[in-house]
Amino acid sequence: MQEKSRLLKVRRAFCLALPLLLLTGCPHNQYIVELAPRGSVIERKLEFYCEDGTDTNGLPKYLNFDTNELAEIARLYPPGAVKENGERYVAIGDFRAKMPKDIGGAGAYTNLATTLGSAGFYMERFRGDDDLATRTARRLRAADQFADLIIGWSRMELGRERNYEHLRRFLDNDFRKDVKNLSLYLWLLQISASGKPAAPEEFGVRFGQYLMERGYLKIEDLPEGFCAARNDPEHSRWLTQIMQRTVAAKLGIPKTKPIPASLEFLNNPDRAWKSWEDYLCTTDVYRAKLRHWQKEKVVSELGVFQRRIFGSFSAQSRTNSSPPPGVPGKPQPSEVTDELFKELIDFDLGTDDHVKVRLTLAAAPDHTNGKWDEARKQVLWDEDMERPDGVQRVPTFCYANWSTADEVAQKERFGKVILTGDDLAQYCLWRAALSKSEAAEWDGMLAGLHPGLGLKDRLETFRFSAASAPRSTNSPATDASALARDLILAGLKEKK
C-alpha cells in the first residue's frame, strides 16, 4: 500500500532526526451510543459496525465485526438484546449507576431526585489510559534509552574526532532533555486536540520554535522542510543535512570550513540509515533478540528432522502429521527501537476507532464538554479513540450534568421557581447526603411552607435537631441545613 510505504519512510527518518509523525490507516470500528435518562435508569442504545472507508456513493464499505468483541458486548447486555441490522449490530439495555464496558472504558450515571427537582450526572471514559504518572515515567525512561543509543552510535562513528567529548556532552544533556520534551509535547497534543481544533497546527509551530531556540533548525530551513514533508525526492536529504550541520557545530567545526570526511555519511539518508542499523546490531538488546531467534530456529529444525525420521517408518504418520510451526524471520536491527518509539511517539499505522454519543435531555445541560443541539434536544460528542489493540493514549471522555426543576412543587412552597441550574444541582447533592432523620426533618419543614408572610422566618430559624452547639463564644453553631437555606433564601431575594 503506497500510503503505508510513505509512512514507513517517515518513520525511518524519525529514527534519525525526530520529526513529528501524522499517521493514518483504513479499517476501523464505528460506535454510536444513544442515551435517554429515565429517572434512576438510563436507556443505552449501542449501534456498531466495522468499515473500511466508503464507496463512491459515500456509504460504508462494511467488514466483518470482530467475533470476540461481539460476544463481549452481548455478555454486557440483557439476553437477546444484541440484534443484527443488516451489516450493523444494535444493542439496547437499561443501566443504573455503572455504564457497561461495551466499547472499553468506564462510566457512570446517577439521578438525584428531590421534592424541588432533580439533577442528573453522566460521565464516561472510552478506552485510553489515565495513569499519567506511570505513562510519564515510561516515556522519560524510553527517552533516556533512545539518547543512550544515539550516544553509542555517535561514539562508533565519531569517537575519534578531536572534540568528540563536546558532542557527547551535548547528546547526554541537551539532546536527552529535548527528546523528553518532544515526547511530552506529543502527549499534550493528544490531550488538547479533541477540545481545541487548532491544536495540531499550534503544536507544529510551538515545537518548531522550540527547535529553533535550541539550534536544531533555522527559519531559513522552512521552505526546504516544507518540500521534504511532502516527500519531494529532491529534498530527501533535508533531515540528515540538519543532523550533519548540528553535529558539525557541536564538534566545533567552523561554518567557513568544509565538512570533514567523517561526517559525509550524514549527508546521505541511505548511508546514515545503514550506519544506524550497523550500530544497533552491536547492542545487547539486538544480540539477545538474535539469540532467541536462533534458538527457536534450531528447535523448529529439530522438529522437522524428527518428523521426517519417524514419518519414513509410518505412512499413517506421514498422513496425520501437521506442518511444523513456522519460525519468524531474522530480527531486524530496527526492532531494537520499536518499543522505544511506541512509548515516545505512540507510533501506530492503524486508523483510530470512532465513537458518537448522543444524550437526549429536556433542555440544555448546565455543564458539558459536548455540543448542545437545540433542534434534536441532544448533547452530542463526536470523537476518535484508540483501537483495543492500539497504543495507550489519553482517553476519550464525555461528561454532562443537568437539572430539572419541579415547577409545581416550587411554586406551591415559594410562590415561584427559585432553584434552577447550578443552584438546583447543589441542592440535590446536598439533599442526597442527608441522613434519614435529617431528610425527614427537612422534608417535613418544606411540606409546611407556603408563599406569604412567615416563609423567610421559617427558613432562617430552621435547624436540625442534631445541630452542634458552638465550640466557643467566638464560633457560631454549625448546622447541616445552612447550604440549602442559603440557596433558597438567595433565590427568594433575587426573584422577587
Image (spheres, rainbow, N blue to C red):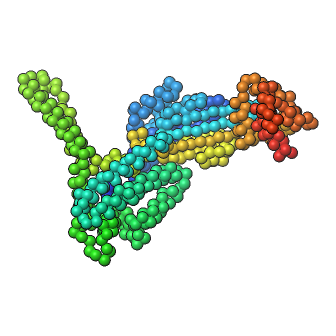
Q: Nearer the viewer, residue 427 or 135?
A: 135
| Quarter of the image where one finds residue 61 | top left
Horizontal side of residue 126 vs 18, given as left or right:
right
User: What's the residue at 39%, 32% (across, down)?
Assistant: 67
Horizontal side of residue 407 vs 354, given as left or right:
right
Q: Nearer the viewer, residue 172 or 381?
A: 172
Horizontal side of residue 169 vs 324, given as left or right:
right
* Quadrant, the C terminus: top right
| Quarter of the image where one finds residue 478 | top right
Taking 456 as reference, is 245 above or below it? below
Residue 353, image x, y percentages: 45, 44
**What is the count of numbered marks?**
0
Residue 440, image x, y percentages: 77, 24
| Quarter of the image where one finds residue 390 | top left
User: What's the residue at 62%, 42% (across, down)?
Assistant: 400
Horizontal side of residue 414 vs 62, given as left or right:
right
Identity of the residue furthest to the bottom in this view: 256
Residue 448, image x, y percentages: 86, 28
Residue 5 in view, yes or no: no
Residue 399, image x, y percentages: 59, 42
User: What's the residue at 60%, 29% (across, down)?
Assistant: 96
